[in-house]
Structure formats: structure tokens, C-alpha cells
Amino acid sequence: METLNFSDSTLCIMSILMIVMPLLSFSAVLIRRTSGGNFAVFNISISFIISILIFLTVWNKNIVHEQLTWFSVGERQFTAGILLNNLSVLMMVLVSGISTLVHIYSLSYMKGDANINKYWAYLGLFCFSMLGLVISDSLLLIYLFWELVGFSSYLLIGFWFTKPAASQAAKKAFIMNRIGDIGFLCGIMIIYSQFQTLDIVKLFGEGGLVSSARIDDGLWISTTSQMPAIWLSIAGLALFTGAIAKSAQFPLHTWLPDAMEGPTSVSSLIHAATMVAAGVFLLGRVYPILDHFTLNVITAIGIITAFMAATIALTQNDIKRILAYSTISQLGFMIAAMGIGAYGESMFHLATHAFFKCLLFLAAGAVIHQLHHFKEQHQLDFDHQDIRRMGGLRKQMPVAFITMCIAAVSLAGLPFSSGYLSKDALLITSFEWAEGFHGVKKAVPYVLVLSSWMTVFYISRLIFKVFLGKSRFEGIHDPPSPMNRTLMVLAFCSIFILFSFNPFSYENSWLVQGFQDAGVLRLDPLHIVVPLAVNLVSVAIIYCAYIIYVRKDAKVFSDESFFYRFSNRAWYLNEAYTFLFTRPAESVSHFSYQFDKRVVDGIINFLGSVIRILSSISDWVDRRIVDGAINSVAELAKSIGNLSRKFQTGHLQHYLITMLTVVIAFFILNYFL
Amino acid sequence: MIPLSHFMLISAGLFCIGLYAVLTKRNAIQILIGIEFMINAAILNFVAFGKFDKFEGGGQMFALFAIVLAAAGVAVALAIILNVYKHFKTIDPAKIDTLKD
Amino acid sequence: MNPEQLIFYFFGALTLISALLVVSIRNLVRSIFLFFVTIFSLAAMFVFALADFIAVTQVVIYAGGVLVLMLFAFMLSNRELLKGLQSTKDGFKLNHFAGLMIALGFLFLIVTAIINTDIPEVTWLKENNIIGQNDNTIHQIGINTMTRYILPFEMVSVFLMMALIGAAHLARKEKRS
Amino acid sequence: MNDFIPGISFSIDNTIGSLGFFLPEIVIVIGFLLVIIADLFLARNNKQLCFMLTLLTLLIAGVMSFNSLNTASISLFGGMIRLDHQAILFKLLICAASILFILFVRFNKTLQLTSKGTGDLHSILLAVHLGLSLMVMSANLLMIYLSVEMVSVGSYLMVGYSSRNAKQSEAAMKYALFGAVCSAMMLYGMSLLYGFTGTLDLNDPSFISGILAIPDISWGLAMVMVLVGIAFKLSLVPFHFWSPDVYEGAPTPVTAFLSTGPKIAGFALLINFLQAFQPMRFGGLSNSLFNFNSVLGAVAILSMIIGNFGAIWQNNVKRMLAYSSIGHTGFMLMALFAFTESGFKALIFYMAIYVIMNMAAFMIVDEIEERSGHDNIDGYNGLGKHAGLLMIGMVIVLISLTGLPPTAGFTAKFLVFSAAWEAFKLSGSPVLMAMIITGAISTVISLFYYLKIPLNAFLRNSGSPAVLLRATPKTYISLLLVFLLIVLMIFPSALVQLL
Amino acid sequence: MSYILSILIFLPLVAALIILILPTSFRDRFKYIALGTTIVQFLISVFIYLEFNSTSAFAGVNKENQFQLLEKVSWIRLDLGSIGKLEIDYLLGIDGLSMPFLILSALVMFVATLASWEIKTNLKAFFALLLLLNTAIIGVFCALDFFLFYIFYELMLLPLYFLIGMWGGVRREYAAIKFFLYTLFGSVFMLLVIIGLYFSVINPATGNHTFNMILMMDPANYIDGSIFSSIANQSLLGISARLLAFIVLFVAFAIKVPVVPLHTWLPDAHVEAPTPVSIILAGLLLKVGGYGILRVCFSIFPDAAVSSAWWLGLLGVVSIVYGALNALAQTDLKRLIAYSSVSHMGFVLLGIASCTTEGVSGAMLQMISHGGLSAMLFFLVGMIYQRVHDREIANFRGLALIMPQFTAFVMIAFFASLGLPGFSAFMAEAFSLIGAFTSQDVNGFLPRWMAIAGSVGILLSAAYFLWTLQRMFFGQTRLKGGDEWLARLKDANLREKFALVPLAALALLLGIFPSLVFSKMNASVLAFIQLISG
């Protein structure tokens, strides 16, 4: 690709411009009540173009890092600046690109909503903070944008704030993210008190402070100060907590399915493509500080999430929820990859996933959108997100069908798709990594493979249930053109060509080359075996899914006399598959779903209620004991006063008696005791 | 020649009798009498000691003044008591307790 | 036990007994007259302390002043007092007991004070400054009044004036207006 | 007979010489006589003659003593009385109290309307004033007894002055009998002291030597009996029982006077009396069983506690102020306790402010009682609206009584605390610390009840619209005093440079 | 020029007098007089801010010649014989620790005055008291003589008592009395300590005892053997005298801050007080406490401060968590915000206790930002209360539909105070916590867990604010008062926006450019740390 040349300062100005553009569409609301969507689209596309330029300039070139003093506390300078390296520019393009598409998509998807201008504003705010998060160069700034991202997602999830569920979900999302944020903050505190700076380059750059800090006899010693070694791991884990919450990892993932209360476009942008990836991005930023223990924890969390989310997705019926869980599990893949040190592969999967998951959501959104309209036209009442109510849409909505299929293929990781490249990259690397170990770590790649197979199953189930089978709705057609076009563009982005000209080898993908290798030794056989094995099984799974979900009702129409044997055999097959695969799968899925609802989410809610109880207890303490003590002091004073009144009987001789008694008592005490 | 201490003992007795009257009698005038006893006890002391104070004459002078003052005091006190009687139709201090907490 | 002492102790006893009667007797008239007896025997004891003038004053002022005042007061509120006497028949009150205790307490205190200090040893009593049998105390008092004690003497006059005015004011019937 | 001759001429010269320093009192005596005459013969045709005469007398006396302010300490009339800078200051305070008192009387309706007229009151006041100044100066047991009796009897008369009121006569009787008992005890104590020392002159060296010669239970008893008399005048706990009843019963001006004049003199007297016992306090005998510090400390603490806590429940404003004045007395005792020069200065300053505060407070209370007919705190409801200015004045006075800025009460309290601190620094006695802490706490407590007045006046609304008569000059006098309180906060030097 | 502080202080007093003099027929002009005064004050304070010299040569804290706009007039000189000469100066001056509060006071006062449009009864008294209070508060921030400081400090009580008591809610009497007694209890004992200090400290120039705070900060000025001299470490009632004095002073200010468990006056006072008074209470009074801890407790008794830092930190953490938990349990919106104040002021204490640059700067910023934000919050509550005279959270639902602008302001205020980055509270709390965490390395005062425990407060604050949002503003509109309320709940009017916008702007501005405050006070904070660590 040809190279452009901009001076660093120009790049910074450009990137600032790129951040600010979406902010304009936010501030537009403040200025004039009605700001059209076109304005927002214009802004975001401008920043997309800029980001492309920056990308082309910076990718695989020297890092651009400009900063200026933001403020200073005591003698400590706190800088604010821009850091452009492969990681940030990649994310930059990803975010701005997808946002642009979603903006366009929203033009028609959100048409006619009462608060549409608010929608654009929030979207703008989100893009602003997400882009800022990507390019900022100090942990403090990152944290700032990190929370802003959470805030804008709060706004967008609760966009239809009149729906109790929506505001509930928004609150849940924000608070669970807050938990992560606190972890992040603690990480920042630890790093700051150890290195007295939050500048990423100074900390994590080559020969940065973190790498130069060493550990001996239980002390973590940096150039300036030292603390017990445990704090290194704590720092890593704390930062990872941030990632867990943001990227919806186990056990803080339950907010994401609820977040589907927001508009679908929002879900696709924020809760599929970009924001949730921020956790992975953060891990990428702070990678050097993660020690072995932390990495192991990360891997464990990653695979657990990947597996259980996949199992849950198997039996969901709400189309968006299926996709949400699939997002969670895919993020689990990325996190796990980070854990095993497959830094590049993880980013690669992040990129590809961004596109095809976004596509999945948007296509699903198209379906929902159309069904919704259909519902309103015919005054029907059914849950227009329930896949059991759908079917046979492939005729009416060909575009949606095709594009979604592409996305599904990519998600399933079948050849010629971008997903194929990235997922195989992940699996292969994990196998290579597992070679180095014995015991439980050996299991990691197998769990990943298993979950990817389940992925294949649930996504094909989704496709089959929605698009194949008998059509139930007459007069449904493809959504208006803006939506369609976005779907097509994304579909293009979901095939291999964008990332590598060789559809089978991820290694010559420019993206993977863009990141330094994690340094696990390469084992050639795996590069052949793993893809073959995985994909063959995947195909088989698709087929049986097809049989389970399509042929079952196809059989009804089959001509008794002619297709008998086939059907019969099919029937056996059916039984066999059901027995061998579906039952266990479903039971596992049900179990893990229940586990998820009852235990994980239960624990979260339980914590919530514990806090409530605590609060009411402390309230009681405050009213009764703390305040009660104060009031009782006042009462005591009064009662003393009352006591002294007892002597004021108005009776002269009593007065004299009391007085003289005191005098005598004084003498007795003083002289005779 | 009477020892001084005997004077003092008698005066002490008188004083305490007066005190008793003050504390127990149900009649303002009797209380007044009790007070007079106490004063007279003091006077007795003064006089007894005054015998040994020829030039200064402190004891006797003091006794003199004390008697005069006491008399005046009694006069005023009685006037007040009569006022009280006018209003309360009693001079029993135990019955006069409109002023109290 | 020479007659002098005999008489002294007689009067001492008389003082105390009469005083006791005064406080213990119910009838006010009697107690007032007994009060006179007490005063008189006190005066007698003054004489033993060679304070004849004081003795005279005592008798004159108390018998002539105080006593008469009290009788007047008694006359003015006679009916009521009799009622008052009935009212006090109500047995042995708590503050009778308390009063008794306190009186005894003070007696105890004063007596201990007297006993602890052996009076004859008090220094100034031993300075030979004692009034002799044949000293004319009246002269001395006269001179003292005009010299050393002139200030209190004058002030007492003011005091008496005030007391007079005040007592008169209180006793005066206010004219209905 | 003859052995008296030499003394005579000497003591006559002494008397003549003393007269020069005794002029203010002489003026008072003359004024006293004039007022009596005026009341008897001239009062018919102009009512306020006695008032004018008394005022004039007091002013002259005041000016005289003010001019003789910086005279060295000197003992007059053969050691009967002793005059020094401090005594003159006390006399000035008393003078101020008396002047305010007669102004108060002048504009007090109930007293002005008594058919017997106020002439006697003025003459009695002058006599009491004389007694007070003697009390301040007296250095001799006889003078002490005489002056105390003079003041007491005068006070009884004042309390029961307008005899048409049952409460007044009750108060007068209680006061008289209570006082008589106390003074009888004092007299007995004096007789014992005289017996032990052979002299009536407190400054006579033989007095202290005589005391030191005998066991301390003896002189302890004697002294306590004398102190009973003084403590009664100061209404210190446990000799305070009369004061709430009497303060409530007496005519408001009299109450105001009783709460200031006799207290001032009482403190002066206490100082004079204790001065004689200095050796027992800090000298050799300070470790004797009879421990002055603990006694005074206990009394002060008790007074602060009983005074302030007792006031919490009062509903009658005058009664409440009576209790609070008990508390104040205890607080002042803290300054006296230090027994340092600065302590006395603080004490005098406090008293000066106290006179102003109390007079103002009682004047306002009386004003309100006359105009709205309420002397109960409940009656004050909503007065803030109808008599705003007066109530604002009241609030400032109360703040000053509590001892908070921006009022002179704060400065005064502050100085007393300073004196106590200093004394604590010198002696380090825990009693002082206890007193200081009690003083601090009692400040908070005092706010508790002082605030009840503004609480009712401003925070609550009266059920029935209060009917208010038009303001009398008292209002303006009291407001003047209030203004004085604030000015003295900002420029205390004006007062302190006299100390 | 050199009298500018006096002008700033006594301008309101003059205005108050004018209001008192004017006849009641002008009653509806009074508020404009007050407003004008506050505006002038604000301009003056801005001028001071701009002129303020923030170089280390003007750090101030414990060097009198480094204070700016110094005014020194010898005020009271009493010759008290053996106590020596009483030396009280009229001593004003500002440094980095006090200057920010001037602007804050002026701003909050401005808002409070705007808020007092709702006051209808007895306007003369109200505005006179308000302005008197104004004088006292600014005086406290400027006074450098302890006597003067104390006078202003006490002067604050009385107006507040009447403001709460006369224009307050149902239980106003209880609240007012409680507030007054609470504070007085603290300050009376403070007076004792002041006197003790006075006897221990000597002005080297004149050789007299002095009340000059700045001289009190220098151990050299203490008479050796005096009760509070750090050399002769005397003990009082069993414990070290200096420690005792520190505790007494701390309690006095902790009551104002308020620190758990001395906070119970706050909810009552806030709930009962009329809106402008709650604004002042939260916006300024609490800051007086924090300022006092910095200027008095720590500066004068650094050694005691060091030895008790751990406990102060603990109290801070407890306040943070306890306050937040209580806020979560409240059903009355105003009470909730009152408790949130307790929680937020806990950060101040934590930051100060850490004795690190970050911590103290954070605490200062927190005070400023909370000053603005709490004022805003109470103003917003007042808006609802004024419209329907109800504050029960349960009685409102879906306000966002009927009062969109109001809701927008509420969200700004809520998110700003729950520490959303970009708003001042975030910077402040973050730095308080960072300071507390670093303390272990720098001076070892506070253990690390305190910072982490404190950060839980951030989570809880998010919880109660968002919960409130969800309950009151989101969902379908449902009001207890029905249509009648619906009619009365108008959206924010111009005056209210006029009051709210500056506060929101302040929060945002300080969030994005904290250097606006930091740069002005860095030198002083460094000097302060220098003083503490000796």
C-alpha cells in the first residue's frame, strides 16, 4: 500500500480533529434542539476519513507520541498527549469505520423516534470518548475516556428510558462497569505510587519503567520506590478487573445480555464491535505489567467465559440475546488469547469479530425492524425478537439473509471468511502454547475448540430458524436501502480479502504481522491439522443442525411412498443426533444458563441486596444509636436539671435543712473520714 | 473565776437550740426567736472574750452593735411577716410556697 | 464551788432550759415570755464577764424592744396563730428529725472545736490585758465609740434610720386610690 | 480611764485624716438625709424629686470615687476600712448598678404606681449603696458584719417594697428569714474568730498568727460559718436556694439590682476576707485538712452546674435569669479562685459586663412584661414580629450572657478563662482544670435555655396576636446598653485601661 | 488595594445594614441588593484570583511575609498584668490554601441568593442574616489571627440558627437547636485551646503573647515549659497536651466537616433548612471545617497530626462508606444528598490525613468541587420542593418526560458528583485516593487498604445516584399529586438556569482544567507538606 507522509504534529492535529468531530454532533443538541442525523453522519465520516489517513501514515512506522503538560500537582507533572502506534491506529480505524456504518444504518433504523436528536448526540459522545480512549497516552486519560464510554453506553442503553427494563439495564451496566473501574483506578494508584507517572510510553514503552522494575526477595523495586511483590500481581489483576467488566467477562458479564434493551444499532456498535473490545485493548496497552500469575488468571477467565457463554447461546430464543452471548464468548476467546500471550492474534480476532458481529447485529436489527413494522401494520402481538416465531425469511429478505450467512460463516470460522483466519490463528497459537506445559493447561486449547464448535451450532441454529423453514409473514421485504448498503459493506469486510490475500494462512495477514509475535515456537503440523479438524467437524455440526432444525419439518411434506427410506434413515439419524448431540448439549446449555441466571447473576443481585440491607442497617444505627446517643445526652442534661429542681420546693425550712446538711457533710468528710 | 470554755459551751448550746427552732418551728415568729437565740449565743461569746480585750474593747463593742442590729433586724422582719399575714392569713412558712419550681 | 460559780452555772442552766422550753412549748405566748427569761439570764451571765453595760443594754433592748414588737405581732395575728398551733399538732415531722440532727451536728462540731483548742493556751488571752473588777467599762465604751469605733457607730445610725423608714413603709396602710 | 487618754488624740487625727478619702460615702449619707427630708415634705408637689436627688447623689459620689481612682492602698479609721484601686473599681461598678437601678425604677410601672410612692425606696437604696461600698472596703469583722446586715436588711425591704403583692411579701419573708439565719451563723463564726485571735482587724498580724496557732478544725469551722454569710450574699450553691424564689417574687428592678450590686460587693468582700487567709492557700498550711482550693472549686463547679442545669426547666424568665446568674457567679468564682492580679482584673471586667448584660436583660424582660403582660417564656411567642427591635436586643443580650462573639460577654468570658488558664499554668491544680472544663460545658448548656427565648420570639408564632402597649424609655435605655455590649466587644480597651 | 480583603468581608455587612435601615416598603428590592452585593463580591474575588501570585515565594502557610493582600492592624492591646500584654491583631491575608475558597464563597453565595427568591416571609430579616453570614464565612477564610478567626467562626452560628429556625421546615426548631449546640460544643473547647496556645506562644518581635496563627506554627515561638511547647512535652489529663489540643481542635472542625460519628446534625439541618441555607451549609460551612483542619489543626500541631494521621484516615474511610450506605437508605431526596455530602467530605479527610501532595491537593479540589456540586444538588432539590412541597423519592416517577431540562441538570449534577471523569469531583476524589495510597511509600501514614476501601465509596455513590435517577426520573410519569402536580411541575425557568449554569460550568471546567485550582495552590500545598513532614 502506498505511503503518505504527515509530520507528527500534523498527525496530532488530525487526530484531535478526528476526536472532536463526533463531539460536535453531541454539542449540536445543546445549541439547536433539532440536529439532523445527516450532520452526525457527516461528522463521523469525516473522522473516519481522517483515521484512514492517519492509519496509512502510521501503520508499521515509527510511533507518534506528542504530549503537553495538562496540570501539575506539587512538582509532579501530569501530561496529556496522543500516542499513535499500530494498536491505536488499528482500533481507531475499526471504531470510526464501524461507527460510520452504524450511523448510516441508524438513519433509517431510528427514523421517526421521538428523541432522535438525543440519539445522535449520545452516539456522537460515544464515538468521541471511544476514539479518545484509543489514542490517549496516559492511564489517567484512558481512565477518563474509559468511564465516558461507560457513561455514553449508559445513556444509550437507557435511551428508551420510559421502559423500566431499559433504565434498569442501563443502571446495571453502569454499576457493574463501575466495579471494573474501581479495579482500574486501584491499578492506576498502584502504578502511580510505584513509578510516579501515568505516561504509557514511559511506563510500557521499550525499556520503560515497568520492564526496568525488578523483583528480588519478595520486593517489587522500581527506580524510585518499592513495595511487596504481591502488589505487582494485584496491579495486573486490578487492571484486568477493568477489562473484565468492560468486556463482559465472567463473572461480570451479566450486564451485556440485559443491555440488549437498547436500540439494536447501539448494541451492534457498542456492545458487539467497539466498546466491549476496549477491555482487550486495555490489556494490550498494559501488557508488560501482567505477570505470569495474572496471565494465568486471564486465560482461565477467558476460557471459562468463552465456554459457558457459548453453551448458554445454544438454547436462547431471543435473537439479540443469542448474539449477546456469542459476543461474550468471542470476547472470551480474545481474552484467553491475551492470557496465553497471543497478543497479535487476539487483536486480529478483535478486528475481524468487530466486523462480522456488527454485521450479525445489524442484520438481526433489520429483521427485527421489519417484523416490528409488520406487527404494527397488522396489529399483531408477538415478541418480534423471538426466533421461534420467525422462519422462512430468506425469500422476503434476501439481502439480510445473504449478508447474515456470510457473517455466520465468518463467526463459525469456515474458510474464505475473515473469521476463519483469526479463529484458526487463535486455536493454533493456543495449541502451540499448550505444548510448553503439562497438566491442566493442556486443556485450554481443547476447551477453546469445543466452544468454537458450539459457536458453529448455535449460529447455524439461528440462521436456520430465522431464514429457512416455512415463511410465516407475507409482505415482508428487505429494509430500506441505507440499511441494506451497510449490511453489504460489512459483509464485504467479513470475508478474508480485507485481511489477507491468502485465505488459508493467517500468518501473512498484514494485521498479524503488524504486532510483534508473542514468541511461542511455531509447530508446522498444527497449522495443517487444527484447521482441517476443526472445520470438518464444524461442517458436520452444521449439517446436523440443519437436520434438526430444518429437515424435521421438511419431512412433513415428503412424499410417503417415494422418500420413505430416506426419511426413515433420516429419522434414525435424527434420533441418533438428537440422542448423541442435542440432548447433552441442551442439558449442558440449560444447566449453564440456569447457573448463569441463578448463581452468577444471582450473586451480583445478592451483593446488591446485601448492600441494601447494609445500608438500611447503617441507617438504623445512624438514627437510633449515633443520633440517639446525642439526643440522650440532651435528655441527661434535662434530667440533671430536673433533679436540681427537686430541691426547690419553695419551702423555707427545706432550703435551710439542705444547705446546713451540705455544710455538716462537708465537715464530716473533711475531718472525720 | 469562770473558765472561758464554759461560756462557749453554753453559747454553743444556745446556738444549737436556736438552730433547731429555726429548722422546725411552724411559725415565723418562733423562727425569729430561734434566730435571736443564735445571735445571742454569738453575743455571749463576744462578751466572754471581750473581758480579755481591754484596750480594743472589740468584744463588748461588737456585742453592743450586734444587739442593736439584731433589734433592727427583728423590727424589719416582723414588719415583713405582718405583710405576709395580710396576704396569706398564715405565717406558717410551710404553707407559704407559691414561689417554687 | 464558790457562790459565784454556783450562780453562774445556775444562770447558765436557766438559759439553756428556758431556751429549750421556748422552742419545745406549743403556746406562743408562753414561749415569748420564756424568751424573756432566757434573755434575762443571758444578761446575768454578761455581768460575769464584767460587761455590765452590755447586760443592761441587752435587757433594755430585748425586753423593751424586741419582746414588745413580738407581742404586738402576736396580737395582730392572734386568731391565726391559734389556728397555726392546731395545725402543728400533726405529729413528728421528717424535718423535725432533720432539724434535730443538724442542730446536734452543729453542737458536735462547735464542741469539738472548743475542746480541740484548749482555750487557756490561746496566746492573746495570756497577754495581761484583762478588764479588772474595778474598771469602768462604760467610760471605755464611750471613748471607744467616739474614737476607734466612730465609723461603725455613725453607720449604724444610718442603718437604723433605714430600718425605721423601711419598717414604717411596710407597716403603713396603703391608702386605697 | 487614763490609759485611754494617749490613744484619743491620735485616733481623732486619724479619723479627721480619713475623712478626706471617705467623701463619696459622706456624700451618700448627706444624699440619704436629703432624700428622706424631700420625701417627707416636698414629694407632694413634684413626684420625681427623690429620683433626681438620688441620681445626683450617686453621680457625685461616682465622679468623686472616679477621680480618686488611682490612690495607693490606704487603711482608714484605724483599720476599720481599707481603700485601694480595686475597691474603688468595685465601688464604681456598684455605682453604675445603682444608677441603672433607679433609672429602672423610674420607668417601672408597678413601682411608680404604688400609692406609697417611691421616695422610701430611694432612701433605702442609698443606704444599701452605702452598705455596699462599706462592704467593698471593710477590713474589719465588725464592719463586715455591719455592712452585710445593712445590705441584707435593705434588700429585704426592697423586695417587699410594694406590699400589695402577695408574691413579693412571700419572697421578702423567705429572703429575710434565710438571710437572718445566715447572718446569725456569720456572727457566730466571727465571734469564734475573735475568740481565737483577739482582734477584729483582718490585716492585723496577730489575726493570722492567732489562726495559725490553733488546730484547723477550729478556725475552719469559724471561717466556714463566716463564709456562709458571704456565700449567701453571692447566692453560691448550696446557699442559693433563696435566689430563684426571691428573684421571681421581687419587683423586676429590685431583682435586677439584687443580681448585680450585692454580688459585686460580695465578691469584693470575699476577696478581702480570703486575703487574710493567703498563707493557708499557698503558704505553709496549704496542706492542712481544710483545703481552700477544693472548697472553692467544689462550690464554683456546683454553682455552674446547678445554676445552668436548673435553668433548663424554667418557664418564668426572671426565674431562669436567677438560675443563670447563679451559674455566672460560679463562673466568676473561677476568676477569683486564681487569686492573681490578672484574675481580679478579669473578674472586674466580667462584672462590669455582667452588670450591663443583666440590667439590660431584666429591663427588656420588664418592658415585655409591662407591654404584653407575659413574664413566661411561652408568652413570648411571636413577639419577634411585634416587638422586633426589643427582641433583637434581647437576643444580643442573651448571646452576651452565653459568652459568644460578637458581644462583650465573649471578651469577658475569654478573660476569665485566660486568668484560669494562667492560674492553672502556675499551680497546675486539677481543680482548676475541672473548673475550666465545667465552665466550658456550662456555656453550651446555658445556650440550651437562653435560646428558648429567641426560639419562642422568632421561631414560633403566637396563637393570638399580642397586644403591645407603646414603648417606654426603658426600651431605649436597654438598647443603649445592648449597643454598649457590642461596642465593648470591639473596643474593650475603653474599659480595660481603667483596670 | 491593600484593603481589598476587608472590603470583601464587610461589603455584605454594609449591605445588611442598608437593608435593615430601608423601610419594609422596599421589601421586594432587598433580594436585588443582596444579589448585587454577591455579584460585586464575585467580581472582586475573581480579580483577586487573577492577581494571585502562585510562585513559591508566596507560598504562605507558615511564613507571614509570604501571605498576599496582608492586612495587619493592631486591634486589642490589653495590659493584663501578670498575664502580660494581650496582643490581638486584625490580621487578614490569603495564600494558596485560602484563596480558592474566596471565589467559591462568592459563587455559592450568589447562587444561594438566587435560590432565596422562593423566600416570601420576613424578607428584611432573611437577607440581613444571609449577608451577615456571608461576612462571617469570608472572614473565616481570610483571618490569620486566631482570635479574629474564632470570632468569625462563632459569628456564623447565630445567623444560621435563625435562618434554619425561622424559615425552616416542620422540625426546624429541633434542627436549629441541634446544629447550634453541636457546633458550639466543639467551639467552646476550641476556645480553651486557643487560650492555652496564647499562653504558650510569644511574638518574638514584641515579646508579648500573641494570637497570630502563623507564629503559632513555628515551634521556636513557644515558651519552653509552656503547656503546648513541643520541646517540653507536657501531659494534660493523662495524654500529651499537644495531642489533646489537636484532638479538641479536630473535633471542633470535624463537627463542621462533618466526620462520622459527629455528623448527625447535618441531615436534620439540611432537611429542615430552606434551600438557600442548605446551599450555604453544604457549599461553604462544611468547607470551613476542612479549611480549619488544614489551617489550624495540621499547621499548628503537625506532630500531633502525624501521630494521629492513621486514625484520621480511618475516620475518613468510615465517613465515605458509612455516609454512602446511609444515603442509599434514604427515602427523602434532600436527606439522601445530605448523606452524600458526608460521604464526599470523607474524601477530604482521607486526602488531608495522607499528608501527601496528591492527597492534600485532591482534598482541596474536592472541597471546591463539592462546594459547587452540593450547592447545585440542593438547588435542584429546592426546585422540586418549591413546586410541589414534597421531596419523597417514591412520590415521583418519570420526571424526565415532563421536566427534560431539569432532568438534564440533575443528571449533570448526579454524574458529576458520582465522580464521572471530566467533572471536578473525579479529579478530586481520584487524587485524594492516589494520595492516600501513595502515603504508604512517601511517609507511611496510611496503609494502602484505606485508599482501596475508600474507592468503594465511588461505587456506592454511583449506586445511590443512579438508583435515584431510575426511580424518580425514568419510567412513565407517575406522581403522587396527580394532575395538580403535573400542572405545577414546570420545567426550569430562566432564573434557575441562571443559577445552575455557572455551577455546572465550574464542575466541568475544573474537571477538564484542574490546573485552574492546582496551579494556584501548588506552592502552598508543598509548603504545607513541608511544614507537616517538618
Image: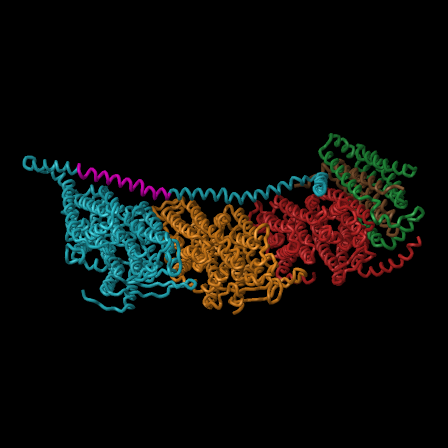
Chain colours: A cyan, B brown, C green, D red, E orange
Labels in figure, total: 0
From the viewer's perspective, tell me whether residue E49 is left or right of residue A335.
right
Q: Residue furthest front?
A: A217
Residue D33 placement: quadrant: bottom right
Residue D120 in the image, given as x and y percentages of width and height: 78, 50
Q: Which residues are magenta?
A: A579-608
From the viewer's perspective, tell me whether residue A585 is left or right of residue A624.
left
Q: Residue furthest left?
A: A562
The residue closer to the viewer here, E244 or B26, is E244
From the viewer's perspective, tell me whether residue D280 is left or right of residue A419.
right
Residue A492 in the image, given as x and y percentages of width and height: 17, 56
Residue located at (43% from left, 51% from top): E450
Residue B14 placement: quadrant: top right
Q: Can the viewer see residue A432 in this picture?
A: yes
Quadrant placement of the N terminus of chain C: top right
Residue D376 in the image, given as x and y percentages of width and height: 63, 45
Residue A29 in the image, given as x and y percentages of width and height: 32, 58
Q: Mostly what secondary structure, the magenta segment?
A: helix
The residue closer to the viewer here, E336 or A16, is A16
Q: Can the viewer see residue C168 in this picture?
A: no
